[in-house]
Image (cartoon, rainbow, N blue to C red):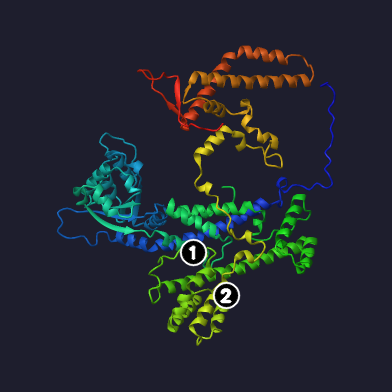
Amino acid sequence: NICRPPVYIPYAADQAEEPALGSLEIDLRNGPQLRLDAYKEAWTRCLDRMKFLIAQLYSPVVSDVIHRVVNINADVLPGLPFPEVPVITISDPSGGSRFLDHLTTELEPEDDDASALVNHLYPNDCINITVAMKSLIGGFVRVPPKRKSTSVAPYDLTLLQAWYDAVGDSRPSLIVLLHDFEQFDVNVIQDMLYICSLQIARLPLTFILSFSTPSPPAYLQAALTRATLSLLRVHHFAVPSGHEVLDALLLKTFFDPGVDLLLLPGPTLFEFIEDYYATHSTSLDAVISILQASTFYCSSTQIAHLKHYTTDPLALFALSTPPLPAHPSPRETQFLQTVLGRLHAPQHHKTAESAWKAQARAAGVLFQAVDAAREAFARRAGQVRLGVGLLGVVLVFLQGGPGGMNRAREKRLRLDRWRGAAAASLRRHQDEAEAEDGDGLHVLLGELHTYLEGLPQDVQAAELEAFHRLDVSASTAEIAEWVEEYLADLLQPLEESTPLWSVWYTGRTPFPSEIINPALRPSIISGLSFPHLYTVDHQDGNGGGKSGEADTDDDEEHLQSLPDTSILFKGYTKAGKTINVYDWFDHFRMVLEGQREEALALLEEGNDTTGKGKGKGKKAIKKEGKAEEEDVNLAVQARFIRALHELDYLGFIKHTSRGGGGRKGEFVGRTVLGVLD
């Protein structure tokens, strides 16, 4: 009898039952905010360091380009039949925007006394010659609305000439920067250069062409006519690129003994960055994005930062140790137990028993152990940075020393020194080092000593003392063995520094490559087939609103619970190579009718359980259904058309021919076959 009151039986857990770690969130009360603060600090340090190094890397080329722009008319050949248009080509195979940003910043300082004005043009700004000239002039002159029929057209170069004559004594240089020059229409560019050449004697225009190809002269020779090339005075510049740039950037960012970053990437991340740089994109912007993702989960440098600070709850200790909770909640108690277990996981001897008991009794003692672990890792990380730098000096000496040791090996030094093979690398070169004469090894010791003298005082003091203890009169084999042992001591694995090493070091954790290069087609099909897997309810502890049994029945879930596009896609997967749109609509309409009937049944059931009342609910529903039947049909048609357009936009539908002996217009073709429903 549904009128009987319900009976509530409280849940009583078994005494032996333990809470599952997967269903209990292990974290401090403000843990997410602490990890976010640690991520911001870690990524800010990393990004500032990389920006500084990139600016240093690009500085020589930027200075050369600026010098050429300033003295663009200083070395003009006399006796030319007509003035030439100054053109500067910049070859940047990386295709990124970093170099152009640095160049633009130097060309246009923030003060008002700029000696040059820069107008940025993109391929979309030059679809034809009229639009191109209007964009070129409008970048320098803000054209007011026309007041008279005699006003100069906004695409007439005379307007720019009149504005430049009215500027006064400042008379800045006019620089036109063409981004992605290979994407421009060649005919439009040739016409624009010819028009500008007619006024170049009165207008100090300079064109800077940005190329992603390694050989701009060859491209200009192939794309432009000889008549156009004769109008140009071209100067070529190349931006540093390639693996040498990547290696220098990564080594100086993460392995500079004078720089302390909160997160040190492991060999797996470096391998992924190198592979991605060589296979997909040689842009430094892509490298920065990868590194950013390695620190915080919410989004191969930035992605790695994004991932790191959420996959491990203990990452909140990266920057500092938070204050102790006065009254720990069950979650915080479980968090403290996790920290205690991580600190003593690798220790099984009895000497750690007293420390374990002390830390288990008081959270303050436990957090002091965390501070000690942070200091221990910082010391070991500093030794590793120093060891990597010294190892680089040794390998450069061995590969470029006398005897031609680098003939049979790759001349370019990559990050092999940091792939867990530091000691093996030294052993591999030990025979070569022992084959060196005494003078050669003394030269190596001198280079190592010079490298140490360039380090900060707090770093070089202890290391120079170790050099002073070396007997310079020892044999060649003894000196080589001492160098090997010295570097091996510095390059001890970071995993052995402290049990909490994963807080500050990524180790061999796999990089989430699907974030950089996602599988779009399977993801779209999976999202259309099982949309509820991507819209889970986070109210329960398991992170989903369905039980395990319901998750196993996703393939047979009712169509009434799916969104419109997924309902249409279900019929799409069950059809043949061609689909009759009318049959497709009938199937869609029947599903929506089932949804409506189910909603009405639930509403009627709710009215029955709440009592009879005045008895108007059921009659009102029937009256409304009869009165608005036409509106409901129109709504169903509109929902079908919208869902159909979404599938068409995603590329699942191929339209057939209309009339003319072909298939009729009510048929559409499938572009994706073999989809597992």
Kindly tell me whether residue 323 is visible in this rendering: no
- Residue corresponding to mark 2: 458
Q: Secondary structure at mark 1?
A: helix
**Could you tell me the amino acid type at mark 2?**
Asp
Q: Is residue 470 above or below residue 212?
A: below
Residue at 53 percent across and 47 percent down: it is 515
Left or right: residue 342 versus residue 668 is right
Left or right: residue 538 versus residue 53 is right
Q: Quadrant of the C terminus?
A: top right
Image quadrant where residue 593 sits? top right
- Residue corresponding to mark 1: 416
Which x, y percent locates residue 162? Answer: 26, 46
Which x, y percent locates residue 65? Answer: 33, 60
Q: Quadrant of the N terminus?
A: top right
**Could you tell me the amino acid type at mark 1?**
Asp
Q: Nearer the viewer, residue 224 or 554?
A: 554
Q: Secondary structure at mark 2?
A: helix
Residue at 41 percent across and 65 percent down: it is 412
Kindly tell me whether residue 134 is visible in this rendering: yes
Q: Nearer the viewer, residue 219 or 669?
A: 669
Label 1 crowd (10 A; few <14 / some 14-19 / many >=20): few
Residue at 62 percent across and 51 percent down: it is 310
Kindly report the distance in space between the C-alpha atoms of the residues bearing marks 1 and 2.
28 Å
Which x, y percent locates residue 279? Answer: 43, 52
Numbered label tally:
2
Left or right: residue 387 versus residue 30 is left
